[in-house]
Amino acid sequence: MAKILGKPLNNIPWENKPEGYRYPVWRYSGNPIITRDNLFFANSIFNSAVVPFGDGFAGVFRVDDRTRDQVIVTGFSKDAVNWTLEEKVIFRGYDPRICEIDGKYYLSWVNLTPNGTTIGIAVTEDFKNWEQKEDATYPVARNGVLFPRKINDEYMLLVRPCDRGHTPYGDIFIQRSKDLTYWGNFRFVMKPVRNWEMTKVGAGPTPIETDEGWLMFYHGVITSCNGFTYSMGAAILDRDEPWKVLHRADSFLLAPHELYETVGDVPNVVFPCSALTDPETGRIAIYYGAADTSVALAFTTVDEVVNYIKEHDMIK
């Protein structure tokens, strides 16, 4: 049996797998959990990330406002399902991720600059006051995701270099830093391989440390005659050299099927950005953007997903 490494989370949101359901990831019956109605100036709220905080949870949320500007706000919850979002904008940009490292909370997001998108990094202890660091990349990059601890005394960041548009170039790389200022030592991680992800891939939630390696959920994109379809896949990376892919599922774990995933501002999108874990039960709660319109929630266990990856492993 696989084991999650980390702190217990007794109040992780959870719903049991439906009877007779055969897939490794299942949706919360109350989806979507966050919609544009959660914030008066929102056109849409999606692609957001949450962490345990205090006796509840905190999060960073992508909001496309009523001018269609892309901004990030914070929010708080007692149960990680029902959220109160703050009206104050903390940064311009989109698709935030958040993780805790040594008692501080590190935000990475797609930062909007006059020369294109970079990966911004900021740090907080209270979700009220933020210290913005140097951008971790030059333009143009997306899907910057920090690991939740230093590895060999270095911060590690998954990233997808790209161009100014919706590029067909979509490979995941890793870069390293001693101080969150100077980044380098780039390594290739993975590229699209199977049809469901053939256009591009990008890292999703903060990687989850297990005794099998780093469990990485990611999104993969296929281009059809009807446009892009975003689905969720998974791989296991080496714990000490996480640019090495040990196992990788050949098929998606979750794809757009429900109405809130197939109909919206951008139809046919499942975009994972965050995951809560409980090592004692092996439970994993995954937050994902649905159709670039709302935030939805899905569940799995470390055994379910690791077994699925190994049973459908494309790494031979």
Image: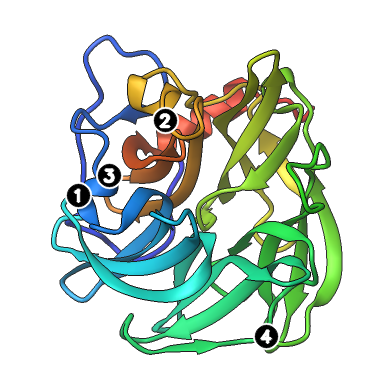
- Mark in the foreground, 1 or 3: 3
Mark closer to the chain start, 2 or 1: 1
Image coordinates for residue 189, horizontal then vertical, percent: 78, 50
- Mark in the foreground, 2 or 4: 2
Mark closer to the chain start, 4 or 3: 3
- For label 3, the residue is 35
Amino acid type indicated by mark 4: Glu
- Mark in the foreground, 4 or 3: 3
Q: Are marks 2 and 4 in contact (CB under 8 Å)?
A: no
Q: Secondary structure at mark 4?
A: loop
Mark closer to the chain start, 2 or 4: 4
- For label 1, the residue is 81
- Asked if residue 32 shows in the view, the reply is yes
Front position in the image: 316 or 57: 57
**CA–CA distance in space, label 4 to label 3:** 32 Å
- For label 4, the residue is 134
Residue at 38% over, 13% down: 22
Q: Secondary structure at mark 2?
A: loop
